[in-house]
Amino acid sequence: MIRRYASPSLGAAGAMLAGLLLVACAACGHRTPAAGPPPAALLPPATPEAAPEYRITVGDEFDVKFEYQPDLNMHLTVRPDGRISMPATGELTVVGLTPHEVEQLIVQKTAERLRNPEVSLVMTKMAEQRVYVGGEVLKPSYVPLRPDMTPLQAVLQVGGFKDTAKLESVLIMTPLPGGKIAAARIDMAQVVNDGVPERVRLHPNDVVYVPKTWIANADVVVDQWVRGLIPALPRVGAGYVIQ
């Protein structure tokens, strides 16, 4: 009978090698992956920006309610001149104000006649939100305001620029409370010719005015053109300089 014996030295070496392999495999199995940013798909969605507070515009309808004097309650519509009229307050200019600011204005106007008046305003119908486009465009008019609308989108809605347009001096004018108007000049040539992304977003009742020549201040533009289109806009003082 022939018997075969494994070499002791070889057996020990094999066992040692097997042990080293097991340790290496165990280390591989428990290796902690390198830390890194999670995939974009697993990230939480970005927090949306809050929309600007609503401001009253021409054609809006609302109920004015007096907590302790219900006989003074009224349903009102904002007239084309931007005003409302109440027996308890008389004429009030409300375009450009927030509903809360209108409440405060009514309280202020009635405080001399009523004891501790408490007023609430409830919006019942919001007029169509518009922006106005004029000057050197094909069809000067208003366009319905869409969310995140840019000046170029508004201009395209009225047919685009004329060849005579001064793209480097386009005006954006925004009515503000208290009879003020904010005006800024934007360079639309960069957008049209160079593809620079638009950063400006339009708001209700904004005016996009495209001139023929460079404009230094806004009083002439507002008083000669814009007020004819939007009577509710106030007059600006002489020398109103555009920022």
Image (cartoon, rainbow, N blue to C red):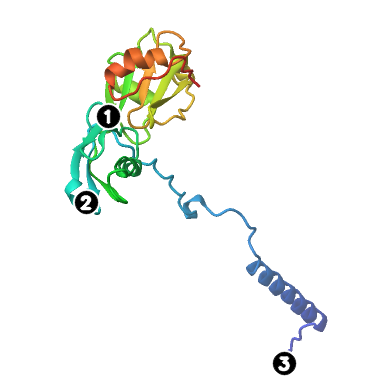
Classed neighbour count for the residue bearing mark 2: other residues with Cα under 10 Å, few (<14), some (14–19), many (≥20)? few
Mark 1 or mark 2: whose residue is earlier in sequence: 2
Identity of the residue drawn at 43% across and 47% down: 48
15 lies left or right of 65:
right
Dot 2 and dot 3 residues touching (CB under 8 Å): no
Outermost residue on the right side: it is 9
Classed neighbour count for the residue bearing mark 3: other residues with Cα under 10 Å, few (<14), some (14–19), many (≥20)? few
Mark 1 or mark 3: whose residue is earlier in sequence: 3
Looking at the rendered structure, the kind of residue marked 1 is Gly
Question: Residue 69 — which label?
Answer: 2
Picture quarter containing residue 226? top left
Measured along the vertical axis of the image, is residue 109 above or below residue 167? below
Looking at the rendered structure, the kind of residue marked 3 is Met
According to the image, label 3 marks what residue? 1
Residue at mark 2 to residue at mark 3: CA–CA distance: 122 Å
Identity of the residue drawn at 44% across and 29% down: 200
Q: From the image, state whether disc 1 or disc 3 is nearer to you.
A: 1
174 lies left or right of 81:
right
Looking at the rendered structure, the kind of residue marked 2 is Gln
Identify the element where label 3 is drawn.
loop
Picture quarter containing residue 162? top left
Question: Residue 82 — which label?
Answer: 1
Identify the element where label 2 is drawn.
loop
* x and y, in percent, of residue 149 in the image: 36, 31
Residue at mark 1 to residue at mark 2: CA–CA distance: 26 Å
